[in-house]
């Protein structure tokens, strides 16, 4: 039985010591058993699957308690189904992935053989955020277990009930030297990021990502950084606005916009802005006829986050933006339940925070463009986004956007769907992240790709040893010419 670790209550020094002790024990256990078999890995994935299924209601309740209200359907889809689906996908391919991959041997070394084998790294650290507190802790764990590793998870302090549930769920299913969860505040997260882990996956903001990478660099711990940023959506001239609005509102209002790959702002042909505002209002009224008491509409996670969003709107308004509150029932913003209606932002000046910072809530700047080239340039002048959405049927335009912009991932004519494709790698680029997980890339990310060269009994390399003579000269003439 895995015993809860009282990390959060200890002093700074003893906190670091107990984290280091935990890591050392796991690393020692790994040395005794460095290469879990296929069956052992499948068993670990099965245990994770059973734990998730057994706790699905508890997960919905805990997240809803932490958020104020989290739609049960959103939790079942985004926290439970996505992870279960990924476990199934990985299980079906693991045998093939674990097989050493044959590589070409340079002709001069034939008949030797070369291959690459995938070896577990040892202990993977996982620091996860609050916005999808189960998915973003367990999806990296699926990849880590598939590649034969052990893992320590440090979930967010902003969703304490869910973090405790995660700790208990993992304790139910895994030995403490295989997988464990440490809870606690930022101080624990900081100490955790300084550990000599064998790999660290951090999901969170770009600002904290920088600190984590700096801390990890002290021990040269390799990092996968899953960060944030402003993900644009372009609507092409040929695409029906009502269809675009439905798909964009789904991506923007799922989890009340608190999604790393939510569309952050929309670029559309200049003359279509007013029509787009109208179809957004209609779509939102259909999706969420009420807000404050509607269980489908998720709350903003904390008063601090709610206040940040309210001040983003106020600042944009003060700086001259036109704000359209899309509130089907005209409820006042209800701070008690932290339900914030969608706010469309038009004509905001570039210096407004809403145009520069990641929004992470139900606020959507709408920006007109003259040509598709202008829209592409607007995106390329800014930090590379985590996701990009293009709505258009013109294939030449689709190709142009795909080749002329760079982002973590893309969904064409949809929002967010690329993250749910188990065979697609997930990860940002530049300030939106580095490294990938999900699918084969996740297995690869947490493995050492070890190149192995096997000399054959009969070989010619002995002929190339000193003292050099005619054989080497002939060989060199052959490969280099006269
Ligand atoms: P955050 O960066 O504030 O916190 C993330 C985690 O880092 C938490 O567990 C926290 O305890 C820990 N942490 C905080 N300070 C730390 C420090 N100094 N050293 C080490 N760890 C520290 O992010 P958040 O508010 O929880 O999440 C929102 C952000 O995460 C957004 O920017 C969003 O785009 C991003 N995000 C990215 C992805 C992705 O897959 N790329 C997914 C979800 C969220």
Image (cartoon, rainbow, N blue to C red):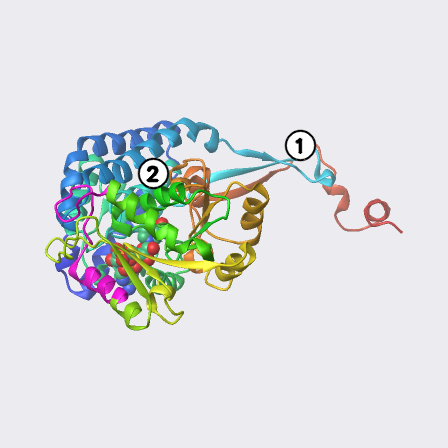
Between 429 and 407, which is closer to the camera in this rendering?
A: 407
Left or right of 185 on screen, residue 447: right
Which range is magenta? 287-313
The residue carrying mark 2 is 142
Residue at left 82%, top 48%? 476
Q: Residue furthest left?
A: 336
- Residue 343 on image: x %, y %: 27, 57
Asked whether residue 174 appears in the rendered view, the answer is: no
Residue at left 29%, top 29%? 46
Between 441 and 249, which is closer to the camera in this rendering?
A: 249
Identify the secondary structure beneath mark 1: loop
Instruction: Report crowding for label 2: few under 14, some 14 to 19, many 20 or more residues within 10 A (C-alpha).
Output: many
Instruction: Report crowding for label 1: few under 14, some 14 to 19, many 20 or more residues within 10 A (C-alpha).
Output: few
The quarter of the picture where residue 214 lies is: bottom left
Left or right of 470 on screen, residue 427: left
Mark in front: 1 vs 2: 2
The residue carrying mark 1 is 457
Asked whether residue 336 appears in the rendered view, the answer is: yes
Q: Is residue 450 magenta?
A: no
Cα separation between marks 1 and 2: 41 Å
- Residue 154 on image: x %, y %: 25, 52
Determine whether 46 is above or below 462 in the image: above
Residue at left 23%, top 29%? 50
- Residue 86 on image: x %, y %: 35, 34
Determine whether 461 is above or below 92 in the image: below
């Amino acid at each position: 039985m895995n015993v809860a670790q009282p990390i959060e209550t200890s002093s700074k020094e003893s906190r670091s010591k107990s984290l280091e002790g935990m890591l050392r024990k796991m690393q020692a256990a790994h040395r005794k058993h460095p290469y879990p078999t296929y069956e052992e890995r499948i068993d670990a994935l099965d245990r994770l699957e059973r734990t998730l299924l057994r706790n699905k209601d508890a997960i919905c309740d805990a997240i809803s308690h932490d958020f104020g209200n989290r739609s049960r359907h959103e939790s079942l889809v985004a926290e439970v189904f996505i992870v279960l689906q990924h476990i199934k996908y990985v299980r079906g391919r693991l045998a093939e992935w674990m097989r050493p991959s044959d590589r070409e041997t340079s002709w001069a070394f034939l008949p030797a053989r070369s291959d690459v084998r995938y070896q577990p790294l040892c202990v993977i650290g996982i620091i996860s955020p609050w916005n999808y507190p189960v998915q973003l802790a367990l999806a990296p764990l699926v990849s880590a277990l598939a590649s034969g590793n052990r893992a320590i998870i440090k979930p967010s302090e902003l969703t304490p009930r869910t973090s405790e549930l995660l700790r208990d769920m993992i304790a139910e299913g895994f030995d403490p030297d295989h997988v464990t969860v440490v809870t606690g505040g930022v101080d624990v997260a900081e100490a955790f990021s300084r550990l000599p882990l064998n790999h660290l996956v951090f999901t969170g903001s770009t600002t904290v990502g920088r600190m984590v990478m700096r801390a990890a660099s002290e021990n040269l711990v390799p990092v996968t950084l899953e960060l944030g940023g402003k993900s644009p959506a372009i609507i092409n001239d040929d695409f029906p606005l009502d269809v675009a609005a439905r798909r964009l509102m789904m991506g923007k209002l799922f989890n009340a916009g608190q999604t790393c790959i939510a569309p952050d702002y929309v670029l559309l042909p200049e003359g279509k802005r007013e029509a787009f505002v109208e179809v957004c209002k209609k779509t939102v009224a259909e999706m969420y006829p009420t807000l404050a008491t509607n269980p489908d509409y998720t709350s903003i996670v904390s008063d601090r986050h709610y206040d940040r969003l309210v001040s983003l709107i106020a600042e944009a308004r003060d700086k001259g933006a036109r704000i359209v509150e899309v509130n089907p029932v005209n409820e006042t913003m209800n701070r008690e339940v932290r339900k914030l209606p969608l706010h469309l932002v038009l004509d905001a000046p570039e210096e407004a925070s809403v145009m520069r910072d990641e929004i992470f809530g139900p606020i959507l700047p709408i920006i007109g463009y003259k040509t598709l080239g202008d829209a592409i340039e607007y995106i390329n002048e800014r930090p590379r986004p985590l996701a990009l959405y293009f709505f258009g049927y013109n294939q030449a335009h689709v190709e142009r956007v795909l080749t002329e912009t760079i982002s973590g991932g893309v969904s064409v004519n949809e929002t967010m769907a690329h993250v749910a494709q188990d065979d697609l790698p997930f990860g940002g680029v530049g300030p939106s992240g580095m490294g990938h997980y999900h699918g084969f890339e996740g297995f690869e990310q947490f493995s050492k790709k070890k190149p192995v060269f096997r000399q054959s009994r009969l070989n010619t390399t002995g002929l190339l040893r000193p003292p050099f003579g005619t054989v080497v000269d002939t060989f060199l003439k052959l490969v280099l010419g006269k």
